[in-house]
Image (tube, grey):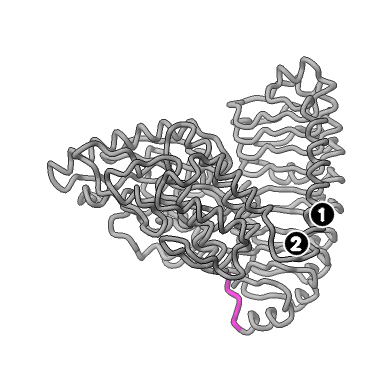
Amino acid sequence: MVKSHLLCPGCFHEEAGNGKCPRCGYDQSKKPFPEALPHLMTLHDRYLVGRVLGEPGGFGITYLCWDIELQRRVAIKEFFPRQLVWRAQNGREVAPLNADKGKIFTDNLKKFLEEARQIDKFDHPNLVRLRDYFRENNTAYLVMNFHQGISLAEYLSEREKIPELKAVEIVMQILEGLKQLHQKRLLHRDIKPQNIYLTREGQAILLDFGAARFAMLENRSLTVIVTPEFAPPEQRDRHGKQGPWTDIYACAVTLYTMITGAIPPSTLKHRPSGDISLGLYEVLKQAMAEDPKRRPRSVEEFQALLKKGEKAPRSPNWAWGLIGALLMLFGVIAILFISSRQQGYYESLDDALKNPASAHVLNLRKSGLDSLPSAVGKLVNLEELNLRYNQLTALPPEIARLRSLRKLDVAANQLKALPRDFGKLSSLADLDLSENEFQDVAAVSAAIGLLRNLQSLKLRECNLKDWSAKIFQLANLRVLDLSQNQIDVLPAQIGLLGKLQELRLESNAIKTLPVEIKNLKELTKLDLHTNQLFDLPEEMQQLRNLRELDLRANRIPESQRKSISSKLPHTKIKF
């Protein structure tokens, strides 16, 4: 385990020197926010404090932190309403500005923790996941998952606009999470691009819900803080009646902004030419009505209107008709497929074992497992097994009997090794072992190298340093994710993975690329964000199918940047 004082508070990789981190470029000698906690101090005897994520809000500061026990990054939000408190001279504790504000702070701190207890009940892919919460330094902290990605606001700053169908898809994901929030009689009250996070896997996550926007106590309320452009009239009025329609208004403004690249006027009177289809414009006009009674009353109603708006007539184009017919055909096929498989889907091992021959999918995600019973080996027809977010330290040897298994997800556990016969899972095509604690990495790599039908392999954040030559025998591999490890050398054998289409190597320590990378003729996406590259081989220009290349946070000289950009004109390159 790396000593804490050697970690960079910007990325939590081992840092060389006390200045800028060679990996992420973060300069820990500069403290951008005076109220922030000191770098690398310990919270709750478990978390090391790193850089501030984003801009501190009116109610709190969010930090990138390091979980010492699980050896992974997390995000921690500190309750810090700046209009009520200040940072004490010891740099850690929070103290009220005066006695009156101290009483208001205490009341709202209790509300903050009450809301945390509510949030802790949620486990939805489109809501940020709360892992822990605790009191310390006279305030409270929320520990949440940290995801690699970008906020919607940052995404829009790079692209300005998002195509309508893609924008609706993002908002639909957010509405799915919002639906669960509303079912618990909670509102978000601050939906905007800054609070929507887009992961590198294409998942949209709603951040910062409820934690800083409570139902304030009468005569002791904090100043109502809203983002005016995204807040409806009733939210700007202290006595306005708020409900699901309040969040729906903000979602509609966000969707309009995504598609047009501009904040909408307070009242929609004219449809922007060319950006929004007529059907969707009418839906947004209703959802952004000044009068809350004219808006959709629930998320379900808003979703139904959005789907209807998508189907409304657009500009004449025969391609849309063809696409619609194909989507309808695929939809029918999907429905038939899903209905034929529902009987084989289980969320309990005991239930699956009652009829083991019929079990095709077993979802034990976040089941609190610290061991997987050997009886799982009886499910000989199992095709998918999800064990993500448990506390497994090992897999039973009997798992090697699952010769029909095609997809295995054991990410975010505490695995130290793989069973000896793991390589006998001959049908396995999709394997995710990310965020585990493997001790003998060479042995793990060797076992994986026997899975000749593997098409997708994810070993993100597994403390990898060394490679096994057997990995490069995976001739059918299409996706390889080795991000957030400690890899400093990319072997020449990478060129043997000729069918590779996506290669993720961000947040490692790679200094050079081998010329054999030219053999990855089918590669469409290459992510080398946050490494130590100072040179690019000329052979990279032979990657004619490459569409996305991320070279941010490296040391590529300007001359090579211009050269690679001219040689790969159809590739979207980030420097």
Please give the range of residues in magenta: 553-558
x and y percent of residue 132 in the render?
A: 44, 35
Give the answer, above or below, for where 48 lies relative to 562.
above
User: From the viewer's perspective, is 228 left or right of 165?
Assistant: left
Q: Which residue is mark 1?
A: 472
Query: Which of these two is toward me, 202 or 28?
Result: 202
Query: Which of these two is toward me, 425 or 349?
Result: 349
How much space separates mark 1 and mark 2, taking CA atoms?
10 Å
Query: Which of these two is toward me, 359 or 1?
Result: 359
x and y percent of residue 92 in the render?
A: 28, 47
Q: Are marks 1 and 2 in contact (CB under 8 Å)?
A: yes
Mark toward the start of the polypeptide (1 vs 2): 1
Residue 484, visible in the rendered structure? no
User: From the viewer's perspective, is 329 left or right of 431?
Assistant: right
Q: Quadrant of the C terminus?
A: bottom right
Q: Amino acid at mark 2?
A: Pro
Q: Which residue is mark 2?
A: 491
* Residue 252 in magenta stretch: no
Q: Residue furthest left?
A: 99
- The crowding category of the residue bearing disc 2, from other C-alpha atoms within 10 Å (few below 14, some 14 to 19, many at least 20), is some
